[in-house]
Structure formats: structure tokens, C-alpha cells
Amino acid sequence: MTYNLAGKTALVTGGTRGIGAAIVERLAAEGVKTAFTYVSNQAAAESLASRLGAGAIAIQADAADPAQSKAAVEKTIEAFGHIDILVHNAGIFRTGPITEFDFDAYRQQTAVNVDAVYAGTHAAVPNIPEGGRIIVISSVNAKRMPFEGFAAYGATKAAVTALVKGWARDLGSRNILVNAIQPGPVDTDLNPAAGPFFEPVSGMTALKRYGKPTEVANMAAFLASDEASFITGAAIDVDGGLAL
Ligand SMILES: NC(=O)c1ccc[n+]([C@@H]2O[C@H](COP(=O)([O-])OP(=O)(O)OC[C@H]3O[C@@H](n4cnc5c(N)ncnc54)[C@H](OP(=O)(O)O)[C@@H]3O)[C@@H](O)[C@H]2O)c1
């Protein structure tokens, strides 16, 4: 499937691995000039950028620091002039019941999963042209809490889904479309199919399996395209039927 995205520009946060890397690869395959961030995995970042060739840029930027999120946006604009497609994907997954999960852990996760989304969007919005897209990788845990210990992570994802709805209103008059993707279990380093959640979580999906990063990237490419021109403020589950 090609979505006529050639010549557009994008910034994807957390693009070295998992869902983010699949989105970067998909956008690049569609002809989008794509910048992506990473926090520590320089070798993977350089290898992905060189594999994608001209037009791909790797930017080291720790999402835990709002100044670095802003700087990543500025570097992308310096390189491309503007950002047509902004994808907030970088995220961490920390769990623990309230009796054990302390405030510092809560603050750290919220900094990466929520504050960076706000800081990056705030910095980018003046340079997102009419017809632009903001896509936030939230989670089905924004609305489903099937296990103990998910409160802090779920709260970060509910927060970004709420930001998406508000920004869809704020930016509608500029025809900037803002949507959230709420993945269910996807086989990545963050939630490996070989890990402890596989049995209980795959069993909760209608399809009885984990998703692949490309299955989330397919939705991101669609939302970035003209085919999605009347979709904004949506929180779209890509979850194999977990949230039913
Ligand atoms: N996998 C799932 O089951 C699942 C389900 C629902 C939602 N999600 C969401 O999907 C998103 C991607 O998850 P994933 O499973 O693909 O994760 P992943 O495999 O752990 O990859 C995380 C990516 O984010 C980057 N990253 C992590 N912390 C960062 C930071 N502080 N600053 C900048 N970049 C950072 C990593 O960069 P480095 O390589 O440099 O470390 C990597 O590129 C997350 O927002 C997650 O909450 C995942």
C-alpha cells in the first residue's frame, strides 16, 4: 500500500527499536524524509539511519528532559524546514503496586511518557503546516487495567489520549489532525512475546496472539495519509481485540 506521502517530513520519537523503528521504516518506505530520536542505542540509530539512506536523521534526545525534546524538534526543522508528521512513540513501561511504586518512579515514567509529548508538540506546532498530523502511541492501558501494578503506566497513557482529544480541538481550524493509537500487546523489547505477560495477555485478545510492530506502523501510515482526512481526536485500538 502506498499513501502518496513522498516528499513529506516526519519526526518519530524512539525510532531505534520496536514500534518506533517499524514506523520509521514504513514512513521512509513511503518516501517521507524521517528524523527519529533515541536515548542510548547509538549503534542501532546509526545502523537504521544508514540503512534508510539520504533523508533519514538520527537524533540523540532523552525524552525525560523537555529541553532535549524541544531540541530534537528544532534539529528536525533545521534539516527539513517543517514537520508534516509528528509521531510521539518513545515510552517506558514500569509497573508496581502503589505500596511499592514510589513517587520518583512515577515522576520518571510520567516525564518520558507524558511531559515529552507535551514539550515536543508545543515546540513543533508553529512549524506543522496545514494538513499536518500528530500521532501519539498511547496504549490500550489508557482504558483497560487488567492487572495490579499498572496504575502509573496506565495513567500516562490515559493522559496522552486526553491530550490528543484536546489538541484535535485546538488545531482543527488549521486542519492539523491529531490521533492516538492504543496498541495492545506488541512483541518488542518492552513487552517481549517470550516474557512473563505473554500467557495472560495474549489469552485476553480475541486473536490469541501478540501483535507485530509493523501492524501498529500500518495504522500510523494510514493516519498520516490523506485517506484519514476526516479522522481527528480518535483513540484507535490496534490490540487484536483485547479491549472488547
Ligand atoms: N510493546 C507493547 O506491547 C506496547 C503496547 C502498548 C503501547 N506501547 C507503547 O509503544 C511505544 C513504543 O514501545 P515499544 O514496545 O516499541 O518499546 P521499545 O521496544 O522498548 O523501544 C523503545 C524506543 O523508545 C526509545 N526510548 C526509550 N526511552 C527513551 C527516552 N527517555 N528518550 C528517548 N527515547 C527513548 C528507545 O531508544 P533506545 O533504543 O535508545 O533505548 C527505543 O527506540 C511506547 O510508548 C509504549 O508505551 C507498547
Image: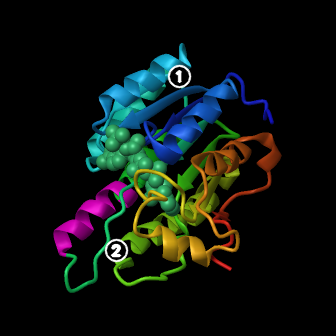
Determine whether, in the image, residue 115 is placed left or right of residue 18: left
Asked if 165 appears above or below 126 in the picture, the reply is below
> Could you say which quadrant of the image residue 113 lies in?
bottom left
Marks 2/1 in contact by CB < 8 Å: the verdict is: no
Determine whether, in the image, residue 226 is placed left or right of residue 184: right
- State the residue position of label 1: 81
Asked whether residue 127 is in view, the answer is no
Query: Which residues make up the magenta segment?
Result: 102-114
Q: Is residue 104 magenta?
A: yes
Q: How many marks?
A: 2
Determine whether, in the image, residue 111 is placed left or right of residue 158: left
Q: Is residue 109 magenta?
A: yes
Q: Residue at 79% across / 32% down in the picture?
A: 2
Tell me where residue 56 appears, x and y as whole percent.
Answer: 51, 22
Which residue type does callout 2 highlight? Ala
Q: Nearer the viewer, residue 43 or 81?
A: 43
Asked if 115 appears above or below 82 in the picture, the reply is below
- Residue 152 badge: 2
